[in-house]
Image (cartoon, helix red, strand yellow):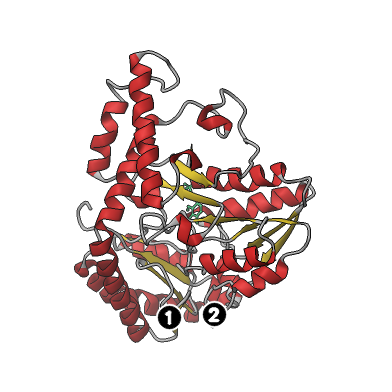
Amino acid sequence: MDGDRIYLDYAATTPLDPRVLEAMLPYMTERFGNPNSIHSFGREARLAIDEAREKIAQLLNCQPSEIVFTSGGTESDNLALRGIAEAYRQKGNHIITTAIEHHAVLRTCKALEDMGFSVTYLPVDEHGLVSPEQVAEAVNERTILVSVMHANNEIGTIEPVAEIVKAVKEKRPDILVHTDAVQTVGHISVDIQELGVDLLSFSAHKFYGPKGVGGLFIRKGVRLVPQLTGGGQERNRRSGTENVAGIVGMAKALEIAIAEMSNELPRLQSLRDELIAGVLNRIPDSRLNGHPTQRLPHNANFSFRGIDSETLLLQLDMHGIAASSGSACSSGSLEPSHVLLALGLDYELAISSLRLTLGRFTSHEHILRVLDLLPNIVERLRALSRSLRV
Ligand code: PLP
């Protein structure tokens, strides 16, 4: 990281790994062929895509033909939900999801409601957990799809997806289960067969790959109506000339992330725990949002009653610390986070949140600097808001 700035917003996006860039560059320059062309330029690009698909399938434990490349997490979620809803409409019109999904899922569900589908938005407990029993109970004879995220992007809570799949399939084996694994792939172990899901979304820029490329796992035998019409690429599931360099980069990034996970995961976890303990000890009336242990190794999310997160973020930014109040997509509006409200936080706590997400370039010094600065900033903002109230 450059200069004195500290980046603590890795859940929003990550910097491109230089090794990934190196792998991508030839496919932006001399190996520029269209993978759908039959000449040698095309074949070169096709080979690169095939190899990337094989590598990703091996790393996630599925078949290469079950991976469809997309433009990222948002498109993968849309393709999964809309594609399944359309394909299985004759069978039923009920979808189950949770109140804490990313907007890529929630707003797609809302759009499907407008198209005549009925959606159950399951509540979560105080830590953000969805219970498998609750999901199974919500199943009815018209249910076609369940979509529960693998880990939440704001609070980092890891959902019991394998247990949810089991509970759903015990009740109705024909119901399809999708998981948005955008925050977990490349960060914690993701084994598609262990999870047992039928569809799984991922996105390269969350694990040090390029932006604008992602993938959707679609289990063999699952039908899906493509959402883009065109040249029929990706075995007719996603038309459009493939983002060759991006796909090559994504495979490389995933390979590196998984190879380095056994070192990186405990390192981040220990920095995160020091950060959490330090904040809770040093800042009165502060709380940790999300599950105390079942959470992403690099996620910390707090609320500090009496301040608003927007002002806090600006103050931190002035001190060179880049953080977030929740999801990057909804910042800029003063709406409290739907995730924090779903945990049961009151409005005042929900608008006072701070998400710090750690990554490859986070050092112990960074954590110490945050622990040094944050208590003073929070105290000053609280004093200011008290003085404005009297
Ligand atoms: N799903 C989750 C859980 C996310 O965190 C994000 C990104 O913030 C997305 C989906 C969207 O992914 P992308 O930015 O690749 O469209």
Ligand 1 is within 8 Å of the C-beta of the residue at disc 2:
no
Kindly state the secondary structure of the residue where label 2 is placed: helix
Whether residue 180 is visible to the viewer of this picture, yes or no, is yes
Contact check, label 2 and label 1, Cβ < 8 Å: no
Q: Residue at x 57, y 75 (%)?
A: 343
Q: Residue, x 56% and y 48% (percent of image)?
A: 77
Q: Taking 370 as reference, is 109 left or right? A: right
Q: Nearer the viewer, residue 167 or 99?
A: 167
Name the amino acid, label 1.
Ala
- Estimate the x, y position of residue 220 in percent, counting from the top left: 55, 44
Q: Which residue position holds label 2?
A: 389
Q: Disc number at residue 81?
A: none
Residue 170 image point, x, y percent: 64, 67
Disc 1 marks which residue?
383
Residue 166 horizontal/vertical position (percent): 58, 66
338 is higher (above) or lower (below) than 17: below
Q: Label 2 is placed on what type of residue?
A: Arg
> How many numbered marks does the figure carry?
2
Q: Quadrant of residue 360?
A: bottom left
Query: In which image quadrant can residue 21 be found?
Result: top left
Tell whether 93 sits left or right of 251: right
Image point 38% across, 32% down: which residue? 49
Q: Mark 2 or mark 1: which comes first in sequence?
A: 1
> Closest to the observer: 196 or 253?
196
Check the image and report above or below for 178 versus 100. Answer: above
SS category of the residue bearing label 1: helix
Within 10 Å of the Cα at label 2, are there few (<14), some (14-19), or many (20+) other Cα atoms?
A: few
CA neighbours of label 1 inside 10 A, class few (<14), some (14 to 19), many (20+): some
